[in-house]
Image (cartoon, helix red, strand yellow):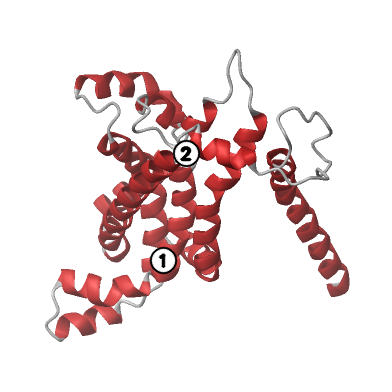
Amino acid sequence: MRDRNGKLNKILIIVLIIFYAVPFYILTTTSLKKDMDVSSKWKMPSYLYLNSFTNAWSKANLGHAFLNNIIILVISMTALIILGSLAAYPLARNKSRLNKFMYYLFVSAMIVPPLSILVPLYQFYSRIHAMNTFWGITLIHLTFQLPLTIFLYTGFIGTIPRELDEAALIDGCSRFGLFFKILFPLLKPVTATITIVTGVNIWNDYQFSLFFLQKSQVQTITVTLSRFFGEHANYVSWVAAGSLLGSIPMIIIYLFLQKYFISGLSSGAVKG
């Protein structure tokens, strides 16, 4: 029975690897072909053609878009980690009726479709002059990524023994000192998980960036690449090359944080 389950698990893993590897393979073959090459997307070209990468970087001003993505990601993730962990601490430690209500309110917010409030949000942003600003798009990311952040932090903090808090308070440590000096370093696994999950969502965001970052000076990678598709132009190889370049930062972050990812996700989702 165990051998059968082991074989099924191996087959499932192989299927999943193929499922996720195929898009990267197609992106790679497409990005390495010349614009006039109409051969099958499944066929790797017999020549080496890197102009699609240089064209995507220079003609689309992809370098500036990378900088915009990095600025938005760093600001958003810093705010998410600080605000999310601080909000989750009292929710995990003090099980009052109010805190339970607030916790379930945050969790229920995760099921709200983001685009359902696009029209009123667009009107509100126009009135407060938040269009085409980094702080404006950052607030949007905070709004929709904070519930998941609080959910995971609350679950993970719930696994940390309360005796640790009591010992620190007896030694004269303040609540903020207890949190930042003792508890926060223990949140490394779930912080890595949040960085990967929410970071990918923020880095790859298209739906909000398209509407709220309309000026070229503040546009992100996804919006910049979308300009390669139009009524009179369709540079598929450039988009494929730009997509590969745009995925590199998230791949690097995942490789560095992968050892914490599963433990942080499982611990953060078990208790709440």
Q: Which disc number belongs to residue 62?
A: 2
Q: Is residue 13 left or right of 192 when viewed as pictured? A: right
**Position of residue 238 measured from the top left corner of the image (x, y, whole percent):** 61, 34
Residue 158 in view of the camera: no
Q: As displayed, is residue 126 above or below residue 179?
A: above
**Left or right placement of residue 43 versus residue 75 in this view:** right
Count of numbered circles on the image: 2
Q: Is 156 above or below relative to 72?
A: below
Task: Tell me, for residue 156, which label it has, or none.
Answer: 1
Is there CB contact under 8 Å for labels 1 and 2? no
**Dot 1, how many residues are within 10 Å of its Cα: few (below 14), some (14-19), or many (20+)?**
many
Indicate which disc residue 200 carries: none
Q: Quadrant of residue 155?
A: bottom left
* Mark nearer the viewer, 1 or 2: 2
Find numbered disc 2 in the image and state the secondary structure of the residue it sits on: helix
Q: Amino acid at mark 2?
A: Leu
Q: Is residue 66 visible?
A: yes
The percent position of residue 77, horizontal first and vertical second, equals 35, 52
Which element type, helix, strand or loop, lies under badge 1? helix
Please tell me how crowded label 2 is: few (under 14), some (14-19), or many (20+) other residues with Cα within 10 Å: many
